[in-house]
Image (spheres, grey):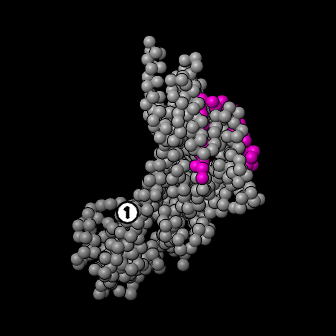
Amino acid sequence: MTRLLRIALAGLALALAAPAAHAQTGRDVPPPAQTQNPNGANPTAGAVTEDQLFRELNKLQGRISIPDGKAAVLEQPQGREWRAFRESWLPWIAGVAILGMAALLAIFYFTRGRIRLEHGEQSGEKILRFNSFERFTHWMVAFCFIVLAISGLNYILGKRLLMPLIGPDAFAAWSQWAKYAHNFLAWPFTLGILFMALVWLRDNIPNRIDVQWIRQGGGFLGDGHPHAERFNAGQKIVFWTVILGGFAMFGTGLLLLFPFSAADINGMQLSQVTHATIGVLLTAAILAHIYIGTLGMEGAYDAMGSGQVDLAWARTHHDLWVEKEQAKTASGPQLRPRATPAE
Amino acid sequence: MARMKFICDAERCIECNGCTTACKNEHEVPWGVNRRRLVTVNDGKPGERSVSMACMHCTDAPCAAVCPVNCFYTTGDAVVLHSKDLCIGCGYCFYACPFGAPQYPRVGNFGSRGKMDKCTYCSGGPEADLSVAEYEKYGSNRLAEGKLPLCAEMCSTKALLAGDGEVIAQIYKTRVITRGYGSGAWGWKTAYRETVAI
Ligand code: SF4
Ligand code: SF4
């Protein structure tokens, strides 16, 4: 009974599908009635069909006889979603984040202007703000980050912006070097992030002073300077952005650098999505950091340049820190408080 | 111009790996790189099927879309090819490809990938047809000699068909109708956004 029913159904399906088949190839299909399986039975009625598998699974996998585990995935339509992310979403996320940040900074610069040293912020006396190890770490991370950001953005925007200008051959050669730079500089970058976490974590634990600092707009808006310890709330935000973002980049980057060692195809896609998204957001955030450390605020650069800042400047911007430093020795401003700088 | 496609009739495929061997030999594909492979689904269970899979030469190919150096191009026969001179071995095409077709020789440190290698539909690359440079980078160019891909030509059961999409679809359709069953044109919906209507 069921067999008869099945044959009848199959016949019906064939009859229904025939016009569609004709439309597709433009050829005549032999009429189904005469082309039944000669013995009338279907020995592989239980066979899987691709359609059926896709209804149950999101990707097709099987057994493979070559020593390449990832080859066992027969079909993964998720590649399409990844493509949509990479080609339709990512360039926009990158463009909006980075150009948006640049625009914000430009607006800030032209309305608020450069934050000048106030009267009486130049006492002539210096205080050591960052010792040589701290500065070395900062500049190592900074250099790596800039190269990583440019070579990373090259994966997203290079073919859209740079390739039309320099042609495919030069662009491919540049991209090859950018890829090597990206792969190798990831390591000193991560090491630097680790050092930063070690030397600055202690001074970056959020506390009540930060709340007050934020409430007063950090001194950016309006006049007056809220109290701050070694790092104010804004700097703490930069610190945590860099530390958390940096480690996230390292984690996802590691998965991408050793493809398929710990993740399957969907894991690899997800790693790339996370790596690229955090990467462009981090780049936008660092733009703001670069702005405020150079163009945005007079005197700020010295801290990472020579490592020494004017005592009066430090009193204005990091009053609680200066107090603490000076309390350590009775002798006023100190040039060599902690670790011995290399000079 | 033909629109070249592959079809694997899984009811006929006996997983002899003749196609993969033919491919390896014809193009002198290096160790570790598999332009064509056999995947067996439902292995050991009723309804087990083996499918021979390589690059399907997709319509609107995902690999070409994601490549950061735009090194892909589509020939007049709708074959998706790429330039190894431009490829930087980033591996993105593998993430986008629904069929796991792109392959990378392992070179250098970390999981570093060399220039991508994949099925060329036996039609070489951007170099001059049948040149030594083309053979060394991409393997032989049978299409330029008027021949079809060797994997399909060699297939002992004629499970794997290569040729103009309409022609091979018609052959497959006739088979399915004659024998009364078929597990579908594997990969067609994903690659070409259409299937062989039976
Ligand atoms: S099968 Fe993969 S490699 Fe081939 S054209 Fe399609 S996406 Fe590209
Ligand atoms: S591995 Fe080569 S072909 Fe593939 S996306 Fe990267 S650059 Fe393009």
User: Secondary structure under badge 1?
Assistant: helix
Disc 1 under 8 Å from ligand 2? The reply is no
The location of residue A162, given as percent across then percent down, is 52, 71
Quarter holding residue A217: bottom left
Identify the residue at horizontal 38%, vertical 70% (top origin).
A99
Would you say residue A315 is visible in this rendering?
A: no
Identify the residue at horizontal 75%, vertical 59% (top origin).
B131
Left or right for A172, reference A323: right
Taking the magenta stretch, the answer to whether it contains residue A311 is: no
A9 over A160 or under it: above or below: above
- Residue type marked 1: Asn
Would you say residue A119 is visible in this rendering?
A: yes
Left or right for A266, reference B79: left
The location of residue B182, given as percent across then percent down, is 54, 29
Q: Counting other residues with Cα less than 10 Å from the Cα at mark 1, is it few (<14), some (14-19), or many (20 or more)?
A: many
Q: Residue furthest top?
A: A1
Left or right for A83, reference B136: left
Identify the residue at horizontal 31%, vertical 81% (top origin).
A110
Front position in the image: B46 or B78? B78
Taking the magenta stretch, the answer to whether it contains residue B9 is: yes
A21 over A326 or under it: above or below: above
Front position in the image: A319 or A72? A72
The location of residue B152, given as percent across then percent down, is 67, 40
Read off the magenta span.
B1-29
Q: Residue furthest right?
A: B132
B35 over A105 or under it: above or below: above
Please name the residue that numbered disc 1 is placed on: A204
Identify the residue at horizontal 60%, vertical 50% (top origin).
B2
Label 1 chain ID: A
Front position in the image: A15 or A210? A15
The location of residue B198, given as percent across then percent down, is 50, 33
